[in-house]
Image: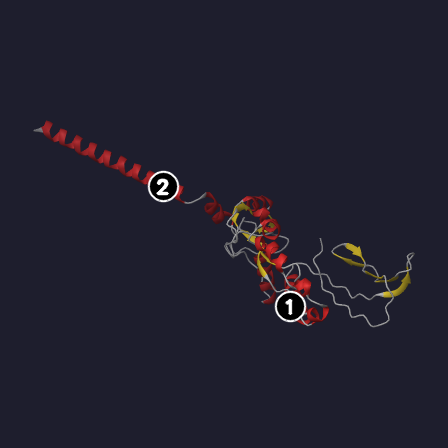
């Protein structure tokens, strides 16, 4: 009788051990399948993304003293928002104080993000993020483009691969000056709208220099051109000046339009 109980207990222990081993194998297999199902790029996205917008940084990456990452746009937004509220800015993850002195750039993360693959929205080609700007502006055959003769009134737009075929049939180069002149006001209004958009982008930069400049002159150059120039001024630790060179005689008022630009 005792032997029967002993054998029964051993069998039960053997079954329990086998059941535990099967459960462990099932969990390991399930974990392996879940890891394999999620691509490496997506796992790195979760690690390297900005703690504020949860997107991969497009330029500089800053980190607080505890290592939490913030893209340049969100970092500047946090500082500006705190300044407007007259309150100290804090890391969105750990709430420690942050400022331009306590936070440093993480160059390793910036380099890692630049090497992650990205897919073009137009042609579906995959390439490193560091090549995105060159591809979208110069290489993509599906990129949005305008006709070469848009400055004289052609309003065609479409994929770059169809641009050459359109320009062979474009009617604008065959029009006379009077026909083209009627379209110029519409062209200039769109250019002004584009300049205003760029101005808003420039005003969102982290550092902005302001100088009140005035052209003085005229001076005569060795080539007998008329030259106007401003006094030297400093911006971001660099000095320079602007010059205006007139190669032809002007007997009327010149209206100058200008816009601010990003320095190198």
In the image: residue 252, left or right of residue 169: right
In depth, the one of 163 and 236 nearer the eye is: 163
Q: Which element type, helix, strand or loop, lies under badge 2?
A: helix
Quarter holding the N terminus is top left
Secondary structure at numbered mark 1: helix
Is residue 180 shown above or below 145? Answer: below
Q: Position of residue 75 (x, y in %)?
A: 58, 57
In the displayed image of the protein, which residue is found farthest to the left? 1
Q: Which of the two labelled residues, at mark 2 and mark 1, occupies the earlier sequence position?
A: 2
Which residue is depicted at the point 62% across and 50% down?
Answer: 138
Q: Position of residue 163 (x, y in %)?
A: 60, 56
Mark number for residue 33? 2
The residue depicted at 62 percent of the width and 59 percent of the height is 169
Q: How many marks?
A: 2
Residue 42: give its label: none
Q: Residue at x 37, y 39 (%)?
A: 32
Up the image or down, 234 lies above or below 255; here it is above
Residue that carries the numbered disc 1 in the rendered image = 190
Q: CA distance from mark 2 to mark 1?
A: 54 Å
Q: Nearer the viewer's eye, disc 2 or disc 1?
A: 1
Residue 29: quarter of image: top left
Say which of 97 and 54 sits in front: 54
**Closer to us: 250 or 81:** 250
């Amino acid at each position: 009788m005792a032997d029967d109980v002993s054998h029964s207990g051993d069998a039960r222990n053997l079954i329990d051990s086998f059941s535990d081993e099967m459960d462990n194998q099932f969990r390991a297999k399930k974990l392996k399948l879940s890891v394999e199902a999620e691509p490496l790029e997506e796992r790195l996205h979760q690690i390297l993304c900005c703690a504020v917008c949860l997107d991969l940084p497009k330029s500089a990456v800053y980190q607080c003293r505890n290592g939490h990452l913030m893209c340049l746009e969100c970092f500047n937004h946090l500082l500006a928002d705190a300044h407007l509220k007259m309150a100290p800015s804090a890391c969105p993850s750990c709430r420690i104080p942050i400022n331009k002195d306590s936070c440093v750039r993480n160059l390793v993360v910036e380099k890692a993000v630049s090497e992650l693959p990205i897919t073009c929205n137009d042609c579906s080609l995959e390439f490193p993020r560091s090549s995105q700007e060159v591809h979208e502006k110069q290489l993509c055959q599906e990129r949005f483009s305008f006709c070469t003769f848009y400055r004289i009134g052609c309003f065609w737009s479409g994929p770059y691969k169809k641009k050459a075929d359109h320009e062979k049939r474009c009617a604008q180069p065959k029009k006379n000056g009077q026909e083209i002149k009627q379209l110029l006001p519409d062209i200039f209004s769109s250019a002004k709208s584009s300049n205003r958009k760029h101005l808003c982008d420039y005003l969102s930069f982290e550092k902005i220099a302001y100088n009140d400049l005035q052209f003085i002159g005229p001076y005569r150059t060795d080539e007998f051109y008329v030259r106007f120039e401003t006094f030297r001024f400093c911006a971001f630790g660099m000095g320079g000046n602007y010059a205006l060179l007139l190669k032809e005689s002007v007997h009327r008022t010149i209206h100058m339009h200008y816009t601010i630009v990003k320095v190198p």
